[in-house]
Image (cartoon, grey):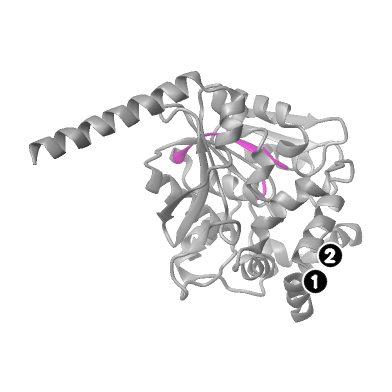
Amino acid sequence: MKNIFRQSLLAALVLTATTTAFAATSTEADYAAAFNTLHQVKAGVLNVGYVDIGPRDGQAIILLHGWPYDIQSYANVAPQLAAKGYRVIVPYLRGYGSTRFLSDKTPRNGQPSALAADTVALMDALGIKQAVFGGFDWGARTADIVAALWPERVKSLVSVSGYLISSQDVGKKALPPQAELQWWYQFYFATERGEQGYAKNTHDFAKLIWQQASPGWKFSDATFNVSAKALDNPDQVAVTISNYRWRLGLEKGEQKYDAYEKKLATLPVISVPTITIEGDNNGAPHPAPQAYRAKFSGKYEHRTFTGNIGHNPPAEDPQEFVKAVVDAAAL
């Protein structure tokens, strides 16, 4: 028995040493290859699929994708950050990629506070007390909510389109016609026809959103197809429809998130150090930077990415996004 224990201990030490040596000598190219390796962990109501690259003792960075995108938005960002010594975690949100619900009985709920709770549960499962957060679209909204409800878990924040916390009451208010037009898909999803249409044409729908949200981004079919695979998740349609119907007050959401929603409905100020980002050619609905400046009370900076940058800055301008994350980590 002692020999077995010694062999196990030796194996563990060798593995740790090997991992440490790899982290110490790995290049951006090494981490780019490692980005293709998925991990799975049970966290909260999910079995989460995620990428985890970089030294395990490095400052944790959590990067959150939006809809209808996936972790590939960070394929050129995460390896650069890992090569700089950060531990970079990029999870599939509920309804995407290899992330699955643990129980068939769990509602396929897409309300924003549920996604934020998922993220905190993932941190707990991975033993991460605090992280630098970065996100766009659903990912930015999720990161904003984590920063507002669990500020002790967020060292600093990089949020594309700034302050995206909202409520059902806010979502019910009519907007000017041009603004309503930008939300056409939200109203489409409010109908049975929209749900069926999205289920039948998920990939084509996603490509149209990519094109509208980033009119200057000339992504290839190959780039799109790699990400679109994540939309084949069996819960993608249900979670997406739930998210947009919840925003319009057409779904109640789950009672266990009511306390979170009550606080979020007050549109709380975010106190953690923050860098907000906007693309100079963002075709998706987004607030003007001056509209949300007062919602950030800590160290703050806003950056506009130029060069025809749309709704997905980490994919469209990875170098500047990496710089923003590194600078935010130092705030």
Reading the image, the residue beneath label 2 is 184
Report the front residue among 329 and 26.
26
205 in relation to 276, above or below:
below
Residue designated by label 1: 188
Up/down of 151 relative to 331, above or below: below
- Across and down, in percent, residue 225 comes to 75, 52
Residue type, mark 1 in image? Tyr
250 or 43: nearer the viewer: 43
Q: Is residue 218 left or right of 100 when viewed as pictured?
A: right
Q: Quadrant of the C terminus?
A: top right
Measure the C-alpha gap from mark 2 to mark 1: 6 Å
Binning the other alpha carbons within 10 Å of mark 1 as few (below 14), some (14 to 19) or many (20 upward) gives: some
Residue 34 percent location from the top left of the image: 55, 36
Left or right: 61 with respect to 239? left
Whether residue 241 sits left or right of residue 117 in the image: it is right
What secondary structure is found at the residue carrying circle 1?
helix
Pointer 2 with pointer 1, Cβ within 8 A: yes
Query: In which image quadrant can residue 315 be found?
Result: top right
Residue 322 drawn at (x, y percent): 65, 28
**Residue pictured at 40% horizontal, 39% vertical:** 128
Q: Is residue 3 above or below residue 232?
A: above
Q: At 65% from the left edge and 52% from the top edge, which residue is drawn?
A: 138
Residue 20 seen in render: yes
Q: Residue furthest left?
A: 2
Over which residues does the magenta segment extend? 153-164
Badge 2 amino acid: Trp
Which residue is painted at 72% across and 67% down in the image? 172
